[in-house]
């Protein structure tokens, strides 16, 4: 479901499932445990998907099949994943190989940098079109990650951003071809992994800490 391998100082995490379910959450939390324990000497994370999608959000079929008493724990785990990614004490890069919708878009925003495939794939906060409210803590994350105008338009219109549009809006930091996207993401991660780990951790915690705390306090 999620593959994790280490290449030098870089942790490469590949989501073979393009939607989020309880099993996906457990795999990701275990992977974060491993990465967090490896950041003291310098490390980086690159997160990517397979095929035409980076992550299409929650697996609604599996979510609806959960017993009612498991719905709240599911939401709490999702918040924990976003929170821990925000303050992960190493550089993090989303190599967006394809579409990122709803929770998948928020997953990409939880990382420090986003590189998109130049020829295919949308970034879309689609909740307005599927009738799903966005919790206040996730709204706070949007305020911290995007400009007010971009956040407004992304939330209220459900706009599907191409790579060029996402770069212009400040959502994505760059683009690359399908063949070179992962290499570009790895290069960015490796370049940043050379920063002094202690100060990098402190700066991320200071900047993103309030967003992360808001997610796990709700």
Image (cartoon, grey):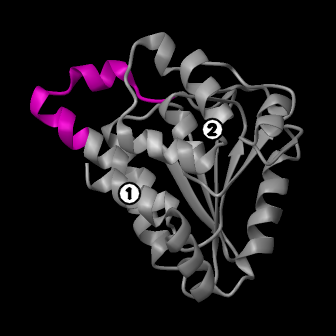
Please say if the residues under marks 1 and 2 sit with CB atoms less than 8 Å apart: no
What is the spatial separation of the Cα atoms under label 1 and label 2, in whole angstroms?
Answer: 31 Å
The relative height of residue 2 versus residue 16 in the rendered view (above or below) is below
Q: Earlier in the sequence, mark 1 or mark 2?
A: 1
The label number, if any, that marks residue 29 in the structure image: 1
Q: Quadrant of residue 7?
A: bottom right
Q: Nearer the viewer, mark 1 or mark 2?
A: 2
Nearer-the-camera pick, 199 or 61: 199
Counting other residues with Cα less than 10 Å from the Cα at mark 1, is it few (<14), some (14-19), or many (20 or more)?
some
Residue 66, image x, y percentages: 20, 27
The label number, if any, that marks residue 104 in the structure image: none
Nearer-the-camera pick, 4 or 55: 55
Horizontal relation, residue 114 to residue 200: left or right: right
Horizontal relation, residue 44 to residue 134: left or right: right
Determine whether the residue tagged by mark 2 lies in a helix, strand or loop. helix
Nearer-the-camera pick, 192 or 202: 202
Which residue is found at the position 47% from the left and 20% from the top? 127
Which residue is found at the position 26% from the left and 55% from the top? 217
Residue 193, image x, y percentages: 71, 76
Residue 33, image x, y percentages: 40, 68
Reading the image, the residue beneath label 2 is 148
Can residue 23 be seen at all in this image of the molecule?
Answer: yes
Q: Is-magenta flag for residue 42? A: no
Q: Which residues are magenta?
A: 57-74
């Amino acid at each position: 479901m999620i593959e994790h391998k280490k290449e030098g100082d870089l942790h490469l995490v590949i989501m073979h499932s393009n939607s989020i379910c309880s099993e996906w959450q457990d795999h990701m939390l275990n992977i974060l445990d491993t990465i967090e324990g490896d950041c003291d000497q310098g490390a980086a994370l690159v997160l990517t998907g397979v095929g035409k999608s980076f992550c299409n959000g929650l697996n609604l079929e599996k979510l609806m099949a959960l017993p009612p008493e498991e719905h709240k724990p599911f939401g709490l785990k999702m918040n924990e994943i976003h929170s821990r990614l925000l303050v992960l004490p190493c550089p993090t890069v989303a190599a967006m190989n394809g579409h990122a919708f709803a929770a998948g878009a928020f997953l990409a925003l939880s990382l420090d940098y986003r590189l998109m495939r130049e020829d295919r794939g949308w970034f879309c906060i689609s909740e307005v079109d599927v009738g799903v409210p966005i919790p206040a803590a996730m709204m706070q994350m949007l305020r911290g990650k995007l400009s007010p105008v971009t956040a407004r338009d992304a939330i209220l219109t459900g706009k599907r951003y191409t790579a060029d549009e996402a770069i212009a809006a400040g959502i994505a930091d760059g683009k690359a071809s399908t063949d070179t996207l992962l290499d570009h993401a790895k290069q960015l991660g490796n370049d940043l992994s050379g920063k002094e780990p202690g100060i990098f951790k402190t700066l991320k915690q200071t900047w993103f800490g309030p967003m992360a705390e808001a997610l796990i306090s709700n």
